[in-house]
Amino acid sequence: MINFSDKLQSAIDRNNSLLCVGLDPDPEALPSRFGTPDNPDTAIAQLTDWLHFIIAQTAELVCAYKPTLGFYTALGADGLNLLQQILQAIPPCLPVILDVKHSDLNSSTVFAQTIFDRWQVDAVTLSPYPGQDLAAPFLLYPDKAVFVLCHTSNPAAQVLQHYPKNDAPLYLQIVKEIRTWGTPEQVAVEVGTNTPEVLARVRSVAPERLILARSIWSEGTVLANILKAGLNSQGDGLILPVPQDYLSSENAGSLILGLRETINQVRVRIPSEAQACPVWFPDIPTTNAHPHTDLILQLYDLGCIMFGEYVQASGETFPYYVDLRTIISNPQIFDKIIGAYAEVLQTLKFDRIAGIPYGALPTATGLSLRLNYPMIFPRKEVKAHGTRRLVEGHFNPGETVVVVDDILISGKSAMEGAQKLQSTGLKVEDIVVFIDHEKGVKQRLKVNGYQAHSVLTLSEIAETLYDAGRINDRQFQFFKDTH
């Protein structure tokens, strides 16, 4: 069976649309030409005709439908019968997102069975507050998806969503948390806002996630700004609602067609603009800040800096973990990191670049391409077959090699790699790392004949995150206590 992600992408490609229609039997929104819902005996029939009209007008112009369960349950048993009838009327090639904001943990399992097995919807919206336990029964269906609400547009919610302060709001913490619940194909984000800045911040924290936008239409809304903030670097990753008043018009199809074309005009420009304009948006003043402030904040916002109990390669246990292996999946930040390394390497003299397996191999490759220097690397283990080389790549004895590693904690991997290179007749004078944990290792390397250089120190990272409000006093102390 086709999964939600593939079904949605097929619909987007087929109809060339990112638009989603809410199929809601709201008596107050019923157009007068379908009658007045004053008579309970005829109201269901009138609402049914209207919803069928909407489907007929939009089936070739949208990528998904989103019925809101609350409108159907408000109509009683007849409403639930209407929902199943409407679900049957939706073309099977178009995915259905059931808007529920489900939040009851006790009924999650049976509710998941009902909507996914019986009603055959493709995705559902959930409340975040019960945590991952709420989502778990829904994620047992690998071909389905969940959209977790992180932000709403109603003014009264701001005091909660932006708590404790705008630099580190709750709604962004929700986005960071749900990224651990499941794959991008299974877990997406719902964002209600007419403010581009909110969408931009969600996109920066979750560049790989699908965003279901709502409540974007208000007086003064600049659609282009909403799109640039919410779309990913490929011009996708965003589902947009059709304005409610369009669905009440006799010319609904024409209005939606025009909106689709307006959106697509912006979409086609996004990939080329992304090459020159980063996806991530800084949110603090950079005056007198660390020169790599944006890079530090982006590492944190993308989940490369985490808190918990983590055993390091050295055997020590730290209350935090810096995971740089995920950066290779984010071209924007990877490019920044390569540039930061390059600034250091350009001050050194060497003939070749050597990356320490395995974490620094992508970085060494990027630096080789950026600086136009040949690359080699010492093997972590020597193969028992083939050439059985200790060092891979072409080199000449007597050449000088700069060693590139990711994080300097004990210095063991960097020195072992350097010694392997030296055993083949190469010279190693400099070792360059991205982060120095400041545990006196640079001095230890110096004693062994190596000059160590780092792009960042742990102190610089901690102070920048603390000043930006990304970490609290306790987390800041974690950093201070471990170096």
Image (tube, rainbow, N blue to C red):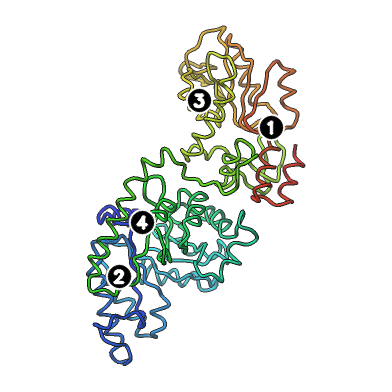
Residue 139 visible in the picture? no
The residue closer to the viewer here, 212 or 289, is 289
User: Residue placed at 64% from the left, 50% from the top?
Assistant: 470
Q: How many marks?
A: 4
Q: Disc 2 or 4, which lies upstream in sequence? A: 4
Mark 4 secondary-structure assignment: loop
Report crowding for label 4: few under 14, some 14 to 19, many 20 or more residues within 10 A (C-alpha). some
Mark linked to residue 454? none
How far apart, in angstroms, are the residues tagged by discs 1 and 2? 59 Å
Q: Is residue 407 left or right of residue 155?
A: right
Residue 266: x, y in percent? 33, 50
What amino acid is at disc 1? Ile
Quarter of the image where one finds residue 112: bottom left
Q: Which residue is mark 3?
A: 367
For marks 2 and 3, give the one nearer the viewer.
2
Residue 25 visible in the picture? yes
Q: Which residue is mark 1?
A: 409
Q: Which residue is mark 4?
A: 3
Report crowding for label 2: few under 14, some 14 to 19, many 20 or more residues within 10 A (C-alpha). some
Mark 2 secondary-structure assignment: helix
Q: Disc 3 or 4, which lies upstream in sequence? A: 4
Residue 149: x, y in percent? 50, 64
Mark linked to residue 246? 2
Q: Is residue 170 left or right of residue 61?
A: right
What amino acid is at disc 3? Leu
Mark 1 secondary-structure assignment: loop
How far apart, in angstroms, are the residues tagged by discs 3 and 1? 22 Å
